[in-house]
């Protein structure tokens, strides 16, 4: 299991990314739930899970 911290380059939200190379995942794209920017293309060969850990500042989004 690989754990990493990822930051959305658009809104600054922080995520914990967990990768399980021994488990097949879903093919598709993970998008930031805050601003809908694509963060990673998933080929389905492994399971990748994201959890939002740092909410971006509301002030930053409304400028
Ligand atoms: Zn974002």
Image (cartoon, rainbow, N blue to C red):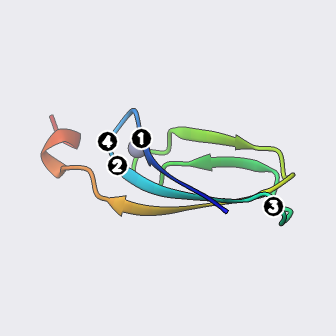
Between the C-alphas of marks 4 and 2, the distance is: 4 Å
Q: Looking at the image, do the residues carrying marks 1 and 2 touch, with CB atoms under 8 Å apart?
A: yes
10 Å neighbourhood of mark 2: few (<14), some, or many (≥20)? some
- The quadrant in which the C terminus is found is top left
Q: Looking at the image, do the residues carrying marks 4 and 2 touch, with CB atoms under 8 Å apart?
A: yes
Secondary element at image label 1:
loop
Q: Looking at the image, do the residues carrying marks 3 and 4 touch, with CB atoms under 8 Å apart?
A: no
Question: Is the CB atom of the residue marked by disc 1 within 8 angstroms of ligand 1's nearest atom?
Answer: yes
- In the image, 52 versus 23, the foreground residue is 23
The residue lying at 12 percent from left, 45 percent from top is 59
The residue lying at 43 percent from left, 55 percent from top is 15
10 Å neighbourhood of mark 3: few (<14), some, or many (≥20)? some
Question: Is the CB atom of the residue marked by disc 3 within 8 angstroms of ligand 1's nearest atom?
Answer: no
Residue placed under numbered mark 4 in the picture: 12
Q: Looking at the image, do the residues carrying marks 4 and 1 touch, with CB atoms under 8 Å apart?
A: yes
- In the image, 41 versus 61, the foreground residue is 41
Secondary element at image label 3:
loop
User: Ligand 1 sits in which quadrant?
Assistant: top left
- In the image, 43 versus 17, the foreground residue is 17
Residue placed under numbered mark 1 in the picture: 8
Q: Position of residue 35 (x, y in %)?
A: 41, 45
Q: Position of residue 48 (x, y in %)?
A: 68, 58
Residue placed under numbered mark 2 in the picture: 13
Res 24 quadrant in image: bottom right
Q: Position of residue 49 (x, y in %)?
A: 62, 62
Residue placed under numbered mark 3 in the picture: 25
Q: Position of residue 33 (x, y in %)?
A: 47, 55
Secondary element at image label 4:
loop
Between the C-alphas of marks 1 and 2, the distance is: 5 Å
Between the C-alphas of marks 4 and 1, the distance is: 5 Å
Res 40 quadrant in image: top right
Side of 43 where 38 appears, left or right: left
């Amino acid at each position: 299991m690989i754990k990493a911290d990822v930051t959305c380059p658009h809104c600054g939200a922080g995520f914990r990314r967990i990768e399980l190379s021994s488990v097949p995942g879903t093919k598709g794209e993970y998008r930031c739930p805050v601003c809908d920017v694509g963060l990673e293309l998933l080929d389905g060969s492994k399971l990748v899970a994201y959890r939002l850990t740092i909410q971006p500042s509301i002030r930053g989004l409304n400028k």
